[in-house]
Amino acid sequence: MSASVTTNALSAPSSSNRSSERMHAAAIAAARRSRGFQRPLGSDNDPLKISEYFGCNTFSFDLMEKKLRAVEVSRLKEYATSGESLPRDLADLVANAVKEWAVSKGATHYCHWFQPQTGATAEKHDSFFSFDSKGGAVERFTGKELIQSEPDASSFPSGGRRSTFEARGYTVWDASSPMFLMQTEQGMTLCIPSLFISYSGEALDQKTPLLKSLSALNRRACEALHLLGHDDVKYCVATAGPEQEYFVVDDSLGALRPDLVLAGRTLLGRNPPRGQQLEDHYFGSIKPRVLSFMMECEQELYKLGVPCKTRHNEVAPNQCEIAPIFEFANVAADHNQLVMEVLKSVGKRHHLTVLFHEKPFAGINGSGKHVNWAIADSNGHNMLEPGDNPSDNIRFLYFLAATIKAIHDHGAMMRMAIASAGNDFRLGANEAPPAIMSVFLGETLDEVLNKLTDGRGGALTERQREINLDLARVPVISRDNTDRNRTSPFAFTGNKFEFRAVGSSASISPSLTFLNAAAADALEVMNAELRRRGGDRPSAEHILALIQETVKATKKIRFEGNGYSNEWHQEAESRGLPNLRTTPEALKVLNQKTTQDMLERLGILGKEESSARYNVFVERYNKIRLIELETLLEMVSTQVLPAVESQISNQAAAVDACTRTLAKTPKAVASRLEGLVGLYGNLVEETSHLQALLGTTASIHDEEILAAKLAGDGMAMMERVRKVSDELELLVDDSLWSLPKYRELLYIL
Ligand code: ADP
Ligand code: MG
């Protein structure tokens, strides 16, 4: 592609006609090639290894060790894990050290970086610039500024927890997650990962409950380990590795789709003759333009200390995945937000729009976020790793049983944790688990547990490679050697669980928070029972008996079959497992007394905080659906119907011409026009229904009633309008259709 052609292709379209704009955008998209955007770090002959620059833009504990005295760093570490607020003297020292470092790297500003209940991140920047006592210009940053800031918070969702006259919210430094420098072409900003709480200390963000859930889990997991005889364990922490799926489309095409711009998904669009049926995209060779974009993203993320590991194409055309090496859950949650931000911003440099929506294209696989989860102790052991000896395996089986119990007892809460307007399109479609929660263990482990519970012990098949069942009847368990089951929402994969039902656009904080909560609750019940039976030092027999009973009592949550099948829906119903299909139904769990009591008892969310969160989520669902409906109305009224009307005029003129020439109207010609006019009539009618529906929603002031209406009538309406419009897409002159089509969005890169 010569430079002049590229430049011409990138200039403004000469005609103001929308459809020619679409053609023009398609030409731009096709003309774009990967260009050297940000070069790899180092020189061409001597590029830097990742290990040489990993984390160079984070203020890690290692770096602190260089900048502060050892005693100060160890004090800081203590505060970082205890969750208590930092004393001023220590805060001042840290603030000064981080300022020196940040300014030396070119930072001019700092911001408290936090995660309000919008699923995104928020930031308010202040400069280090100040005046000293003599009026001289200096860079200054105090401990007070580091620890806390007070953004004007009245516009963040609070679910009724703040009235406007009491709108203060505070961001508080989360010392457990490293500060980092966000780089743009113009310079650097120091970002301070923070919590966001109200004046009276209630959580207004996603991160505060996550940290509290980690501390709830820590307490119960340590208690369990001490009962099992692992006295040397000091703390336990959940670990998480989120696999992030996303789509990329050329931004010149994306910009011409009001639905992608406003709703993040296509509300209209016919499936092209070629979708994903050739199955040639999954793990296929990555297009150079996309690969160049991925590499630049990874370079940015490595600088920020995000340990990216895997990149590949996903099942659908233009769908990709990025996965990091797992980390402590609180850091993984921050890092996943950074991954999404960096993908978006680097995408812009590559003229790519990155879509995180769970179902951007109808009829094509949607995107999820597989959140891998386990629990690690202070000695570096993974509680979900089968061990080599009976003692490690007792521990493994105890935590495995507790996790199964967690999902058994709190399946509906876990469904609530992943509920969102976008995920409703994906769950239960043919690429994601249904809205029914179940646990998949794999053949080997399923068999081990079955044998444990029927009291037979011994005699496992050769293939399962179990030995040693006699030793206190504790099996030695071989590592995962079974097939993957991609249809399960919560699957054991060797040494961790994979929570597969999480939506791709969601923050992982809520799913981790509720998973930690469920696990903490299950452990608490089991620990209490164990203590009741065996005191502080229960015997192996006591422990094993409790494991057996727990596994037996929770059997109905385990499902090894095909989660996508209709039979499973029936079977799940007969087992009494909830199937909460829509977000409004699923969210109700958060407003129920039993859920709220448990979250309060575990110290994760007070009852009022849970209710407030429920309000925020319901309102958010309604806002998203209303944006979709309004956008659909606008697109159909201003883009689809006018194109259809032009088509009718053109076709009517053609019919006239035929009739004049032949002195009669050929039947096939007449019926082609009639078909078009018939669908036009349908679309006009459906559009007026859509308008009427929007009119009625305006008068519903109860958010729950509105949510039910939108999930029912609203969704059905969108489907009906779409069906007619997609049929018309095939009947209208391609040059009159102003919306970029699926074949362009999915195949041009
Ligand atoms: P797959 O696609 O086969 O499921 P990937 O390698 O893409 O596997 O992703 C697995 C994810 O699970 C990675 O992010 C990995 O770091 C993470 N993981 C591995 N072990 C643990 C663990 N103990 N706790 C949490 N996450 C883990
Ligand atoms: Mg996976």
Image (cartoon, rainbow, N blue to C red):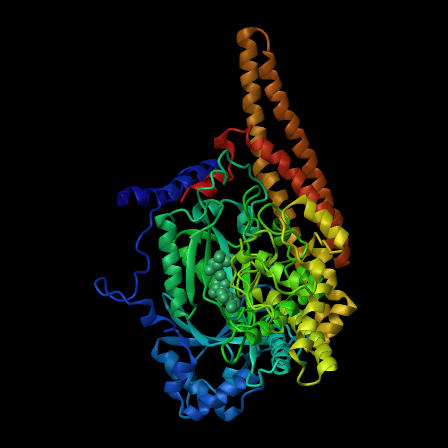
Q: Is residue 321 above or below residue 27?
A: below
Task: Between residue 604 and residue 664, name the one nearer to us.
Answer: 604
The answer to whether any part of residue 156 appears in the image is no
Task: Between residue 672 and residue 308, name the one nearer to us.
Answer: 308
Total marks placed: 0
Q: Residue furthest top?
A: 663
Q: State which quadrant residue 618 falls in.
A: bottom right
Q: Quadrant of the N terminus?
A: top left
Q: Residue at x 62, y 80 (%)?
A: 228
Q: Residue at x 75, y 54 (%)?
A: 575
**273 relative to 667 in the view: left or right:** left
Coordinates of residue 417 in the picture (x, y in percent): 65, 62
Coordinates of residue 556 in the picture (x, y in percent): 71, 58
The answer to whether any part of residue 610 appears in the image is yes
Q: Is residue 35 above or below residue 391?
A: above
Q: Is residue 535 above or below residue 694?
A: below
Coordinates of residue 311 in the picture (x, y in percent): 42, 56
Coordinates of residue 386 in the picture (x, y in percent): 54, 68
Q: Quadrant of the C terminus?
A: top left
Q: Residue at x 55, y 36 (%)?
A: 270
**379 relative to 526 in the view: left or right:** left
